Amino acid sequence: MTRLTKLLIGGVALVAVSAVVSIAVISPSAAIDRSTGSAGTTTPNVVWNAPSISEIIKPGESKQAQVVLSAQSAIPAGTLRVVPELQPFLSVTPSTIPALAKGQTLAVTLNFSAKIDALPGTTTGTVQLRDNTSGTTIAKPLPVAFSVQWDRANDPKTGVSFSYPTLGAQGSVEVTEESDTTGPFSVFDISFAAPGTSDPEPQYSVVISPNSQSSSLSDWFRANIDPQSILLGAHVFTLSTLSNGVSVLVRTGPMPDAYTDGSHDPVADIYAISPTHKTVIVVGMSNGGSLDLSIDQLHQQLLGMLATLQAP
């Protein structure tokens, strides 16, 4: 079996599962934040019992945390607003507050959640208290940093590490050394139980091989996958570079007839090369994988892995 036939090309819809979450609330600050209006009068303000909130969560999880705001002067009735960047992950209870006298406090619940297909990354923003009458922000907003984290694979022998999704299930990674007519390569099989099942099985494969010529990804692709430039010539694949410097060729167009008649080896959806051009990476669903993903969902998950990849 070659490194290409290790990958199953295809996909299909996500089902939600849950996992574990951790939350870090920074200790209360004794500082009182006051702001002065243009006429020299002190505007109503509040003090949060934590200067900021930092949340780390896995896809499919939800968590609640509580903070307390204290009125340092009389506060008019207002609305607690989550900025748009955080709205996919955070809501607050209550969302509206009554007028508060100086010295009164109010407990606020922060409701964090991440969809099952959430990609790794950090989003920052604030929770703002706004005056219902004027629409202005009252005193200092509460800063929030929200991070989605995947499990991580790390293989000291190959020097390769990357984060990978498990859709909320317990995951594991097995690395095997194989070879074919093109030379040796390493296969990372990522296993976990698909939603609605209980038995872990390989779902994704990441194939790592050396690029002895240090050629570009396009040149490697022509030499090893598309010697007649049929696929690249027909713009079946789109070339781009991820934020970590990994170059990727992603299948975005229909396969030509010449590749659908059974006369060619299977073609993966995504090929990649490390920033040094010393390592080629092929990613896809494992043979026998039971995930129900659409092509777009599959590509998002695979590109999420590649965006976190470190390799020689």
Image (cartoon, rainbow, N blue to C red):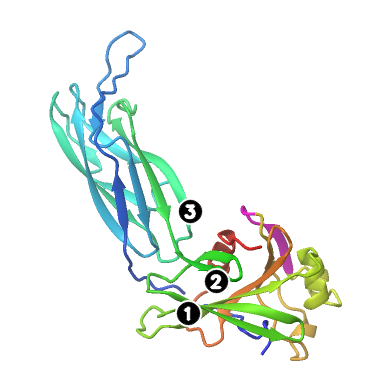
Q: Which residue is mark 2?
A: 298
Question: Position of 65 compared to 188: left or right?
Answer: left
The answer to which quarter of the image holds residue 8 is bottom right
Residue extending furthest top? 39
- Local crowd size for mark 1, using a 10 Å CA cut-off: few (<14), some (14–19), many (≥20): many
Q: Secondary structure at mark 3?
A: strand
Q: Which residue is mark 1?
A: 291
Q: Which residue is mark 3?
A: 121
Amino acid carrying mark 2 in the image: Leu
In this view of the protein, can residue 251 be seen by the observer? no
From the viewer's side, name the closer residue of 83 and 57.
Answer: 57
Q: Secondary structure at mark 1?
A: loop
Q: Secondary structure at mark 2?
A: helix
**In the drawing, what numbered circle is on residue 22?**
none
Image spot of residue 44 (x, y percent): 25, 21
Say which quadrant the C terminus sits in: bottom right
From the viewer's side, name the closer residue of 168 and 251.
Answer: 168
Q: Is residue 243 magenta?
A: yes
Image spot of residue 97 (x, y percent): 20, 36
Image spot of residue 200 (x, y percent): 41, 83
Residue visible at 64% across and 84% down? 178
- Local crowd size for mark 3, using a 10 Å CA cut-off: few (<14), some (14–19), many (≥20): few
Please determine whether, in this image, residue 86 is positioned above or below residue 128. below
Q: Is residue 154 magenta?
A: no
Residue range in magenta is 237-244
